[in-house]
Amino acid sequence: MIPSLPPTPARHALRGRAVTFGANPFMADPAQALVYEADALILIEDGRITQFGAFDALRDTLPPDTPITHWGDGIISAGFVDTHVHYPQLPMIAAYGEQLLEWLERYTFPTEARYADPDYASDVARRFLRELLRAGTTSAAVYCTVHPQSVDAFFTESARLNTRMVAGKVLMDRNAPANLRDTPQRGYDESLALIDRWHQHGRQLYAVTPRFAATSTEEQLDLAGSLLRQREGLFMQTHLSENLAEVEWISHLFPNRASYLDVYAHAGLVGPRSVLGHGVHIDEGTFHTCHAAGCALAHCPTSNLFLGSGAFRLFDALDPRRPVRVGLGTDVGAGTSLSQLQTLNEAYKVAQSTGRRLHPAQAFWLATAGGAHALYLDDRIGTISPGMEADLCVLDPHATPLMAQRAEQCQTIEDLLFVLMMLGDDRSVRATYVAGALVHDRDAPAGQPA
């Protein structure tokens, strides 16, 4: 059951504590980069933010009869952005006992075969998007399966909810079960038809999606590069250097390429709006190439820990001398939660294990403005400011008795954000707004199934 929510007026306002960013806290003093309003007013009109600032400064500028929702002790943030997640893997989350390549064979491929059934795909797409919204995530870069119907199911539900999503059909023409393989030409043709059907349809955006180099021939990768040149504004998403055995395998499959990343670059797949998942085992030369090309890395700490893949070098990736765009990914099912709060919990621990401290402002930037920047969507989502799309979540630092007890000791907003990222999960998301409409209210009475 999901909450039964009343319609949201086209013009309305939110009041409460609010956090956003005026700068990148990896490039500037985190305390200065974080923007905090202790009593903020956010005016929303027709799905966009039109005013943001202190309530006392803006209250008299509100149009007459504008309804105001006051969120009390809640903290209003831009909605979270997930830069790497597999929606078809939701049914197999928390599958025991394997590392990457064995895990794909034992769990992932059998699960993904079920998406040949469009009804099954539609059911999981609804559940997946509902879980994202419960976790405060309003945008994501999403992998579907090799089946076009899995893409149609996902975008149909996303369009119904009006979420801004990036997604695409997985391309695989080798090293996968026969019922999950396409061919280079069929993958191209099906992808192009999906692009024409969904790319820039409302808030939907398409990503050309070769799963990873091992499951595509050079011909398929070359055709994927050709797809990117067919329409403006397309994305590309794939995996890079997640696991040492995988890296070794790629070197044998592509002996003429200088590196794992060079496999993709040779096919024309590395550039702006290219999102490379994981990037755990990469060298300085690869960081330089990513910086120069303008592509992004998706940091997936829960997945990397769960599968024993290794520790992503976040601060090396964001070195101010040649910063790489970085966002957070939950990955699921290798990841263990769709909650970006829980993902930040693990990102903090991974940073500690590499001798670095992830400041709470840096963490929340990764989950919001940083993710939007990684996806080249930071002109639309990821921060709270006039002109931005009104994708927002309201966080509750008192969601559990333990959190409430700990929050009482907090002296600063940074302290509260740290409590949220270490103790929080989907219970800490009080509400979620998509294009200004309330789509999740944790405390609303139960209604009918979506």
Image (tube, grey):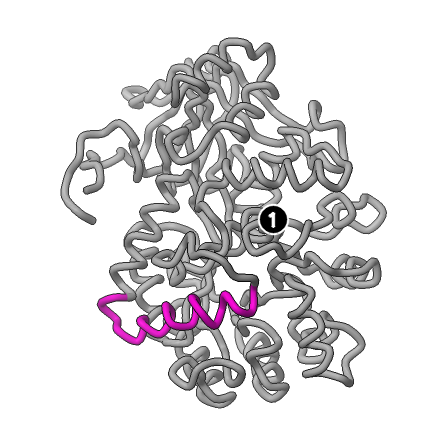
At a point 63% along the width and 86% down the height, the residue shown is 218
Is 316 drawn above or below residue 192 in the view shown?
A: above
Residue at 45% of width from left, 68% of height from top? 168
As rendered, which of 154 and 305 lies closer to the eye? 305
Report which quarter residue 409 is drawn in. top right
Counting from the top left corner in percent of width and height, residue 163 is at 38, 50
Amino acid type shown at disc 1:
Gly
User: Does any portion of residue 61 appear in the rendered image?
Assistant: no
Residue occupying the point 20% across, 34% down: 6
**Outermost residue toward the left in this view:** 448
Question: Where in the figure is residue 180, as x and y percent of width and height?
Answer: 41, 80
Residue drawn 56% across the image and 30% down it: 20
Q: Is 328 included in the stretch rendered in magenta? A: no
Residue 151 vs residue 199, the one in the foreground: 151
Q: In this view, does 79 lie to the left or right of 128?
A: right
- Total labels: the figure holds 1
Q: Where is residue 347 in the image (x, y as percent from the top left)?
A: 62, 40
Q: Is residue 84 above or below residue 263?
A: above
Look at mark 1 in the image and give the residue it sits on: 327
Where residue 270 sits in the image (x, y, percent)?
Answer: 68, 69
Within 10 Å of disc 1 (Cα), the crowding (few <14, some 14-19, many 20+) is: many
Picture quadrant where residue 150 is located: bottom left
Q: Is mark 1 on a helix, strand or loop?
A: strand
Find residue 441 and report its image quarter. top left
Q: Which stretch did the figure color magenta?
A: 100-120
Q: Nearer the viewer, residue 408 or 232?
A: 408
Whether residue 114 appears in magenta in the rendering, the answer is: yes
Q: In this view, does 323 lie to the left or right of 134?
A: right
Using the rendered image of the protein, determine whether residue 224 is visible from the camera's viewpoint.
Answer: yes
- Specify the farthest residue to the front: 97
